């Protein structure tokens, strides 16, 4: 089930994050491990085991945690990223210095459990609309400091990423519209200042706003919290006006409602739920 669209951040980005989290956990030194071991080259072996059913994500990131502590650590993934695992299934074997394994254990497991939980819930959402053209996209509702990895996890689960940050694209939301005095004024002012080739997305809540967004050539129109019948009408209106305009649905999307939303004919369905409502997937590390 591995998603080939999931791309890890480059090491120059990833390492900086991992090093800060390792420093937070290790502090001035691992008192337990340093007192226990007489040498920092004591060899060790460990296994990662799934303790709950779910989609595995973050194994290459966990491997990097250990390798930052000891470049000779060998982290062998026994399943691919994106694999659905059952309780008791072996997901990785690790060989390396015992102090590196013990010091890196918590940070590596925390990331693996968090990202696997996101990938698992994302997969559940994606499966609900797998036979329909609409695609699930994530949002910027992420944990500060973890966004790039949490969005990686949604991609492993089968979603596609929405903008990573405010500089990726223009999204004119309700508060922007209020500040500008209307959709027409917001689009006009923003288009005059943004660089090519940024796209302009506009959040709409009713059909009049949809018409205004179309008249002012928005590239993407978001249908926010619309009833399904209004959403159907909006999709028809947009398609008849300009088939090149992409349509996104958003607002209180759940596992129970996502299929009905997809059936309206939208291109994308955005939801924060796969990140904000996911539970950590229970994983354990056992020394051997």
Image: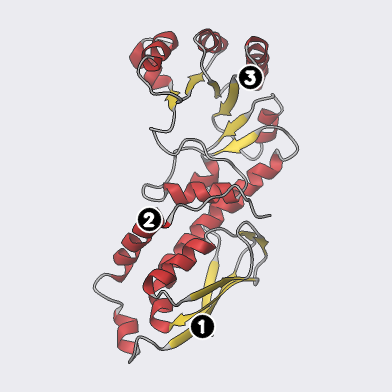
Asked if residue 257 shows in the view, the reply is: no
The correct choice, above or below, for 172 with respect to 109 in the image is above
Q: Residue 21: percent from the left, percent from the top?
A: 34, 61
> Where is residue 78, by image quadrant?
bottom right
How many dots with numbers?
3
Mark 3 closeness class: few <14, some 14–19, many ≥20 residues within 10 Å? many
User: What residue lies at 60% left-to-right and 23% top-to-bottom?
Assistant: 247
Which residue is pictured at 62% across the width and 50% down the height?
Answer: 4
Q: Nearer the viewer, mark 3 or mark 2?
A: 2
**Residue 191 located left or right of residue 57:** left
**What is the residue that sits farthest to the right in this orientation?**
131
Residue tagged 3: 231
* Cα distance between the residues tagged 3 and 1: 55 Å
Task: Judge left or right: residue 135 versus residue 212.
Answer: right
Q: In terms of depth relative to the viewer, which is nearer, 176 or 165?
A: 165
Q: Residue 45's mark?
A: 1
Which of pointers 3 and 1 indicates the residue nearer the eye?
1
Quadrant for residue 260, please give it: top right
State whether residue 266 is above or below residue 110. Answer: above
Q: Which residue is mark 2?
A: 12
Mark 3 near mark 2, Cβ–Cβ under 8 Å? no
- Tell me the SS state at disc 2: helix
Q: Position of residue 255 (x, y in %)?
A: 64, 40
């Amino acid at each position: 089930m591995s998603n080939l669209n999931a791309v890890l951040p480059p090491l120059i980005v990833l390492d900086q994050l991992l090093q800060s989290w390792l420093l937070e956990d290790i502090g001035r030194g691992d008192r337990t491990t340093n007192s226990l071991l007489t040498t920092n080259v004591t060899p060790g072996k460990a296994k990662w085991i799934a303790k709950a059913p779910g989609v595995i994500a973050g194994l290459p990131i966990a491997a990097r945690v250990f390798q930052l502590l000891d470049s000779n650590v060998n982290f062998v993934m026994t399943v691919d990223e994106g694999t659905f695992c059952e309780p008791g299934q072996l997901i990785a074997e690790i060989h390396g210095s015992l102090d590196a394994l013990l010091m890196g254990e918590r940070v590596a497991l925390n990331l693996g459990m968090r990202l696997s939980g996101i990938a698992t819930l994302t997969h559940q959402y994606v499966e609900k609309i797998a036979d329909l053209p609409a695609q699930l996209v994530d949002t910027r509702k992420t944990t500060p400091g973890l966004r790039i990895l949490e969005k990686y996890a949604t991609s492993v689960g089968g979603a596609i990423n929405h903008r990573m940050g405010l500089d990726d694209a223009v999204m004119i939301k309700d508060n922007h519209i209020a500040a500008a005095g209307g959709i027409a004024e917001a689009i006009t002012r923003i288009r005059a200042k943004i660089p090519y080739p940024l796209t302009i997305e506009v959040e709409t809540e009713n059909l009049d706003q949809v018409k205004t967004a179309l008249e002012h050539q928005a590239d993407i129109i978001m249908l926010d919290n619309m009833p399904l019948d209004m959403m159907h009408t909006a999709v028809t209106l947009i398609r008849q006006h300009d088939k090149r305009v992409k349509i996104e649905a958003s607002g209180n999307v759940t596992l129970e409602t996502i299929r009905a939303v997809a059936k309206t004919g939208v291109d994308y369905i955005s939801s924060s739920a796969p990140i904000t409502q996911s539970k950590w997937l229970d994983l354990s590390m056992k020394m051997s």
